[in-house]
Image (spheres, grey):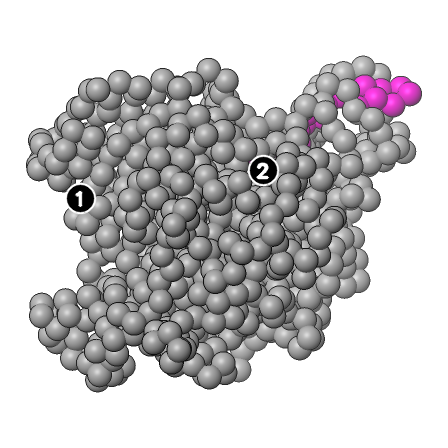
Amino acid sequence: MMKGETPREPLEGWKLTEKVFDARYARKYESIFCQGNGYMGVRAATEETYPSTRRGTLIAGTFDRIEEKHSTELPVSADVMAVDITLDGAALSQSSFESYERVLNLQNGLLTRRFLWRSANACLSATFERFVSLKDRHVLGQRITLHMLEGSGTINIETGISGSNRPGIVHFQNAETLVDGTVLQYAETTVESGIDFVTSAIISAHVLGVDTHKLTALSRVLEGEGVMNAYSVTLRANETLVVEKLARIATTRDNDFDAPPEGHSFRYALMDRECVLMTSLWATGFNEALAASIRQWARIWETRDVQITEATGFDQLALRFAVYHLTIMAPLHDSRMNIAAKGLTGPGYLGHTFWDTETYILPYFVWCDPKGARSLLHNRYLFMDAAHRKAQENGYEGAMYPWQTAWLSDTDTSVNPRMSACEHHITADVAYGVQYYYQVTGDLDFMLRFGCEILFETAKFWCSRLQYSTQNKRYELLHIMGPDEYHISDNNAYTNYLAYWNLRCATEWAKELCAHYPKDYAVLCQRLGVDAQVSVWEERAAALYLPQVNQAGILPQDDTFLSLPQIDLAPYKQGTRSIRADYDKSALLKLQVAKQADVAALFLLLEDLFPMDVKKRNIYYYEEHCVHESSLSLCTYSLLASDIDEQDSAYAFYQKACRIDLGNKMDSSDEGIHAASLGGIWQCVVLGFIGVRARNDMLCICPKLPARWKRVTTRIFWQGQPLTISAEQTGFCVKALEGDTLPKLLTPSGLHEAPGVSYRETY
């Protein structure tokens, strides 16, 4: 490839396409076509603006609140993608399109929109391209190409940096604009958190044709609202107007921004730095900036792609869509930040992190990017101070993780006090994520420095959260909400078992450290008092009530769920009616109806807890009583259906999960994509259909492919060793990419120890 050349990769299996534009559904496409790199997310709002448009550029970790009564949220940064454009006086937003197509190329991150645009005297071909760099997290670019096919017409374009067209609460003050030669800059500061944002851009416009020339821009400063370049030109047949823009976004919260000497302004130091870097970026050129990002995407797909051989192409595309978004949602550049429930694709859930991260998203990074997984878990360690404060404020000990987290200093960011007050299983979920990470990666350094402390402090919390029943002579968890979220009751099975697991895991690690790492153990004992706690953890775990299966073989979700009246869920499960239209929260509390997988989620995490026949009976039972209102539910049931050898059901749930964002429900993704569901989709394929699991110190592989699939191939890391796995209907093959032997493998035919660099099993 020549330097500066824009690579053109084949699109087969990689193309997400919008064939017809309908402004009513703009927000869905803005979310699913979103571009990003973990630092920033740029919604795919069209260059022109419609009433339904929700523009948005979100920067990870830049939380702010306006008033104490408001929850902290990610503010919407200044916009560099909006363009005001007219042809012979007619605005693009008031025009109709011919031959319309918009394509997000998942392979290289490039978003391209093409159509024909006519006026009374002209017909031109319009192409809009944009990218957010995966190579340099601060960089994004846009190119507009207008080619006159017939006649001639006058084109007016105004583009630059806009601070005015932002939805929702505006979190900024003290806006300032600067035009320094060719560099446009817009600076502003968040109201409460005091973070300076600096957006910089350079724009050029050229007419290509017989009289090729550069257009002169009229720069216009909008007082407190941005800075724009305006261009006007009359295009004749076969002439082309090309407008290129490169931009940078940076903040004083960035971990690559060095604070200036005392007495110097943070804002102006950042503006000066960005002006220099913007000029250097422009000298490199648009094509090379795009090519550098594409090369980085190629590295991602080299190790993360899951190749599916199947007839329709949808399953392959849906999985690549999931991996694409898992890539752009994760702020792995800075462990002070974590993944939001909508990633960086929209305003949903205010940019906050939930239990979803450990349960549904983390496994992807554990198996595919252990370094990234470590960063996400290190973030939970950095939240320990806030978790301690949360526990103290509620009268508990140890570390109580908030239901929603934003910035490290926030004790709790929840806008739903009902859930925050009683949905406490997130503390055990975080602990589970730590142990899961260690089991797959063997990263002892993380455990000694961070992980064990999380396990110990969360165990302390559960000891203080448990209540002793003198009547039943046991410890219980009262007034608790599990993953179901419709019900608040006592002794939620998911929460009780995970709390028990947390106590047992902490105990085992304390004994392991004491026996084999006495110096590390002594440090933790001195700081945390672990030695005095271990016997308490053992005593509480032994006396903690764990619900058992009843005579019908059903594990009670909680103390009351199975005694509640049942209703016909068919209309709600078929999607013909919303259960919320017929029942409010108080009514749902009194029905045997689950919002999402609850007991099923317990079987997913603690997969060896019950025998197969019990799991199968309960999976069927609870699915019949579940309306799957949460996007987390379908992937859970798909994974469990694979576990119990119900492959048709597993595939059906997988397909439904894929269509949460990619289906024809046109308001499903207005507030952003469903981040945890996308992590779950990856799990359905790799952990479900290929059957990759961690069992003690062994890698387990037990493929159960859908009948429609011929082959699935992927890469994973096990204990730091990269492997490729290729599964077919008749068997599978595992190859070591590094090292002389494979690890111990547990397969359908039994245990295989160090079976060489390649192992094949046929059925």
Q: Residue 147 vs residue 747: left or right?
A: right
Is mark 1 in CB contact (under 8 Å) with mark 2? Answer: no
Q: Is residue 120 magenta?
A: yes
Above or below: residue 181 compared with residue 649: below
- Nearest the camera: 347 or 127? 347
Residue at x-position 16% and y-position 48% = 697
- Nearest the camera: 229 or 318? 318
What residue is shown with label 1? 698
Query: How many dots with numbers?
Result: 2
Residue 660's label in the rendered image is 2
Residue farthest toward the front in the current orientation of the protein: 551
Image quarter where the C terminus lies is: top left
Image quarter where the N terminus lies is: top left
Q: Earlier in the sequence, mark 1 or mark 2?
A: 2
Q: Position of residue 496 (x, y in %)?
A: 39, 64
Q: Position of residue 639 (x, y in %)?
A: 40, 38
Residue at x-position 45% and y-position 30% = 649
Give residue 130's quadrant in the image.
top right
Above or below: residue 305 compared with residue 541: above
Residue at x-position 25% and y-position 45% = 694
Q: Main secondary structure of the magenta part?
A: strand
Q: Which residues are magenta?
A: 110-129
- Nearest the camera: 620 or 722? 620
**What residue type is disc 1 on?**
Met
Please tell me whether mark 2 sits on a helix, a strand or a loop: helix
**What residue type is disc 2 on?**
Ile
Q: Residue 686 vs residue 235: left or right?
A: left
Q: Residue 26 vs residue 729: left or right?
A: right
